[in-house]
Amino acid sequence: MLTVALLVISNIFMTFAWYGHLNFKSVPLWQVIVISWGIAFFEYCLAVPANRFGSYQFTTAQLKVMQEVITLMVFSVFSILFLKEQLKWNYVAAFILVVGAVGLVFLPTKADAHKAVAESEPVKTLVAGGAKQ
């Protein structure tokens, strides 16, 4: 749960860093870059620990796909509330497909089943005179 919370908060910072300046197009680009880097610093301060903590519970593929869905959810809210853009049907359909990717990456695979069986079997070691459990 901590991983998800950190990823959500980091994505809020990231979304503002990457897209927030679009409401301030009169600000010179160099200033926007400096401000965006300042905002992104806080995003990194949250995303790096989120991935470190999450790596104990999830695979890197699971972390990445989860992060992408969080990004889309945060961006959707940001786009509607801050940029005043409409969420069109094809955007929603594309987002649903990405959410489907999360479902796929969390499905157990045949390799996962074999690994679980292997870890649950007693380990046999060869000792002088025979096998011992």
Image (tube, grey):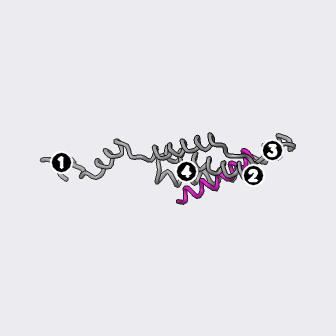
Residue of label 2: 82
Residue 68: horizontal and vertical position, in percent?
58, 45
Residue in view at x 55 percent, y 50 percent: 51
Residue in view at x 52 percent, y 48 percent: 63
| Dot 2 or dot 4, earlier in sequence | 4
Q: Main secondary structure of the magenta part?
A: helix
**Distance between mark 1 and mark 3 Cα atoms:** 68 Å
Q: Which residues are magenta?
A: 1-19
Residue 80: horizontal and vertical position, in percent?
71, 50
Residue 10: horizontal and vertical position, in percent?
64, 53
Are circles 1 and 3 on residues that touch, CB within 8 Å?
no
> Counting other residues with Cα less than 10 Å from the Cα at mark 1, is it few (<14), some (14-19), or many (20 or more)?
few
Residue of label 1: 127
> Counting other residues with Cα less than 10 Å from the Cα at mark 2, is it few (<14), some (14-19), or many (20 or more)?
some
Residue of label 3: 32
Q: Is residue 79 left or right of residue 60?
A: right
Q: Is residue 125 left or right of residue 2?
A: left
Q: Is residue 26 left or right of residue 62?
A: right
Location of residue 110 by image quarter:
top left
Residue in view at x 58 percent, y 42 percent: 93
**Distance between mark 3 and mark 4 Cα atoms:** 27 Å
Residue of label 4: 51
Q: Nearer the viewer, mark 1 or mark 2?
A: 2
Are circles 2 and 3 on residues that touch, CB within 8 Å?
no
Q: Nearer the viewer, mark 2 or mark 3?
A: 2
**Distance between mark 2 and mark 4 Cα atoms:** 27 Å
Q: Is residue 43 visible?
A: no
The type of residue carrying mark 1 is Val
Residue in view at x 54 percent, y 48 percent: 66
**Residue nearest the observer in this picture, 75 or 52:** 75
The residue tagged with tag 1: helix, strand or loop? strand
